[in-house]
Image (cartoon, rainbow, N blue to C red):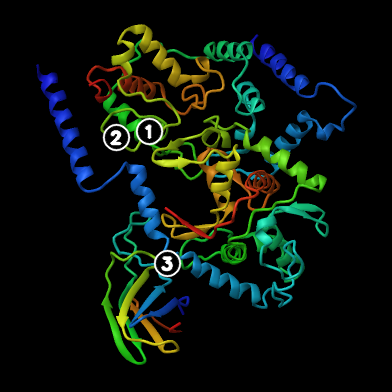
Amino acid sequence: MRSHHRRAAQGVAALFILAAATALGQGSPVDEIAKYRAALQDGNPAELWEARGEDMWKQARGPKKASLERCDLGLGPGVVKGAYSELPKYFADADRVQDLETRLVWCMVTQQGYTEADAKKNPFGAGNDKKADMEALVAYVTSESRGIRMNVPQSHPKEQEAYRIGEKIFYYRGGPHDFGCATCHGDDGKRIRLQDLPNLTKVDGARKAYTTWPAYRVSQGELRSFQWRLNDCFRQQRFPELEFASDASIALTMFLARNANGAEFDAPAIKR
Amino acid sequence: MADPMKIRANVVGDTTEVKVLMSHEMETGQRKDAQGKTIPAWHIQTVNATWNGKTVLSAQWGPAVAKNPFLSFKFKGGAKGDKVQITWTDTRGDTRTDEATIG
Amino acid sequence: MHTRYLLSVMTAIVVTGCAGGAATPPSATDAGIAAKAEAMLKASFKARGQAGLDRLDQDETQRVCSALANKPPPREIAEKIERANLAMIKWPADGKLLGDWKNGEKIAQEGRGKQYSDDPAGPVGANCYACHQIAPQEVSYGTIGPSLYRFAKVRGYGPEIQKYAYGKVFNSDAYAACTTMPRFGHNGILTEQQMKDVVALLMDPESPVNK
């Protein structure tokens, strides 16, 4: 009776909406998001961060009034081109595995005279009035690896250990929601709401995901780095806060970066 | 002073295409902060582009333009080596002018 | 007791992982790496807002499921986890399992709650739509979990299904060991009334889910 009519009306409404959507040339919601992303490719605001980062790299700064042009990112002092494609890696002078941000902190401390606390403070920007130097430097350095194949080393025992520890952290479930990275990123073809989730346990998913960070996040209005991505994932996992350039962040980055080996680096990118 | 713009200008045949990336908050004036207070508007109001001193584009922008706006336009004329200059002014009275050479 | 069962189960996994071969330095074994990872994790986080470092302490279910690293648990391990979690479910004292489906929909839509960026006095939801299709009107749904559209229509409206729905929301591991679904009641995310409202969203004949 009434419910039958309502169901019939709903059926008609659904058909109408589908017809209208097809007439407008609209695909599924996920397809439309892909179209939106394609339209954003031109004029990526990340270039503004890249330009600022390049200036910062060359500028004499800190108590020692030195530039970062002698900073060794793994390919020799001052060599920026291709450096990100081989990070994280073991550095003999620090006797530990370091990712890009940790290495930048290292150079800021040893060459520019900043304290470690100063180098690490305010790592993530929040508007024009609260810019993060680190994000600009990351944008510049990563832009110099664009088009280069990921080639993260696994020869040093500490590199191998960092990978294995990173893998354990990836599967570590905790907090009130029992979440771990694998909860969202351990399966093929899944999405959270309408956001497709890369399967980071497989080479294909790891490659697609890792090679597109850092990225200008339109919703944030900021250039966001991989350190930021990890930090924000853990926040949403209901964990306490992941410390910037911490050991766990390096190990996890090692796990994901090495899984992406062989893929062409394609960042700074632009995302929703 | 606001961050510099990134300007690219290329001539193809008799048309020059200009692409500009501007660094600006573009606050609409409709958002509210965590305490419920309206965040005041702060956005670009006028954009002017010149080619060898002659105006080729003049625009009035409002709050609908996105943060860190990207502007792309074409004009008839232009040759390699010519100068293209972009100027914006905003609601606070700030202004920024940057120049690029047509490639 | 269920804890002893799970401890022996965990030992079994670890021993199997290190089977055979010459003496390996402790850090290189799977158990060694796991211990290092846990220590590194705890040293790399700081308390913030309502999220304290205690959130990194794992209970037995989390520990066993983490060690499995996404592989489905073998039958006897799964049964032990499910039995242990089922025993921990707290059923409503008044015996009523159905609340208000309209409120259930709000709870399903609400993505806030328990993050360090959330106001501890603010709304707490279950964020069901992050992973599930539920009411047909909502097209922005995730696919981490199965569709719940027509939940009761398909399974029936009786007390047994009501109990299953409530139990699943309270503690999903009681029915599917190492599930990706949070244990909303067991871990104190939702209140009893909120869980009843979510059950109503799935079970009420008037809910859009069953229309």
Q: State the SS at label 1.
A: helix
Q: CA distance from mark 3 to mark 1?
A: 34 Å
Q: Are marks 1 and 2 on the same chain?
A: yes
Q: Which mark is residue C138?
A: 2
Label 3 chain ID: A
Q: Callout 3, which amino acid? A: Gly
Q: Given contact means CB atoms under 8 Å apart, are the residues at marks 3 and 2 in contact?
A: no
Judging by the rendered image, the residue that carries numbered circle 1 is: C129
Q: Given contact means CB atoms under 8 Å apart, are the residues at marks 1 and 2 in contact?
A: yes
Q: Which mark is residue A43?
A: 3
Front label number (3 vs 2): 3
Quadrant position of the C terminus of chain B in the picture: bottom left
Task: Decide if residue A96 is on the left or right side of residue C102.
Answer: right
Extreme bottom residue here? B53
Name the residue at 71% across, 74% down: A63
Q: Are marks 3 and 1 on the same chain?
A: no
